[in-house]
Amino acid sequence: MMARTLLAIGALVMALGVVAGALSAHAATAAAHPDAAQLLRTAVLYHFVNGLGIVAVALVARGGTRGSPASLGRSDSPWLVAAGALLTAGIVLFCGALWILAMTGHSMGPMAPIGGLAFIAGWLCLAVHALRAS
């Protein structure tokens, strides 16, 4: 169940990444921040990279249910759950903060750095899962 949910979230995040990429090309010209184009490019890049991370976590979780020798362990691993949740939170916080800054010129304070920390923690959780898998 977790693998299916994460795969659906990852696919939706990737679809939204395509939309965000298309919108950013047009939105940057009317944005409030002078560096809006660069901020939006960064937001879209991180959106895609970490969206693929969510898909990867889902595929690892899905492989864990098959019992194959190449499996990376239990599909219900708390490390996988944490990885998926943290990568998703990072996209919302980090990318959202960059979009808000670019479009309004207003900083969201620590929202972007907290989102960045969520990205780092999510990838580390995936690494811990891989290292602890039997």
Image (tube, helix red, strand yellow):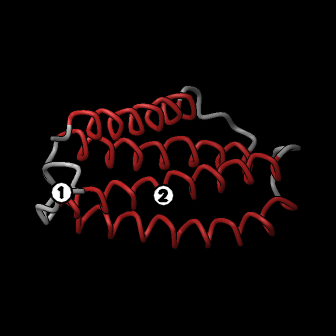
**For residue 56, side relative to residue 49 (left or right):** left
Q: Secondary structure at mark 2?
A: helix
Quarter residue 7 falls in: bottom left
Vertical comparison of 125 with 48: above or below: above
Vertical comparison of 27 with 109: above or below: below
What is the x, y in percent for residue 16?
53, 69
**For residue 47, side relative to residue 84 (left or right):** right
The image shows a total of numbered marks equal to 2
**What residue lies at 74% left-to-right and 53% top-to-bottom?**
41
* Residue at mark 1: 69
Q: Earlier in the sequence, mark 1 or mark 2?
A: 2
**For residue 98, side relative to residue 74 (left or right):** right
Q: Amino acid at mark 2?
A: Gly
Q: Nearer the viewer, mark 1 or mark 2?
A: 1
Q: Secondary structure at mark 1?
A: loop
What is the x, y in percent for residue 14?
51, 67
User: Which quarter of the rendering shows the C terminus?
Assistant: top left
**What residue lies at 48% left-to-right and 58% top-to-bottom?**
51
The answer to which of 59 and 92 lies nearer the viewer is: 59
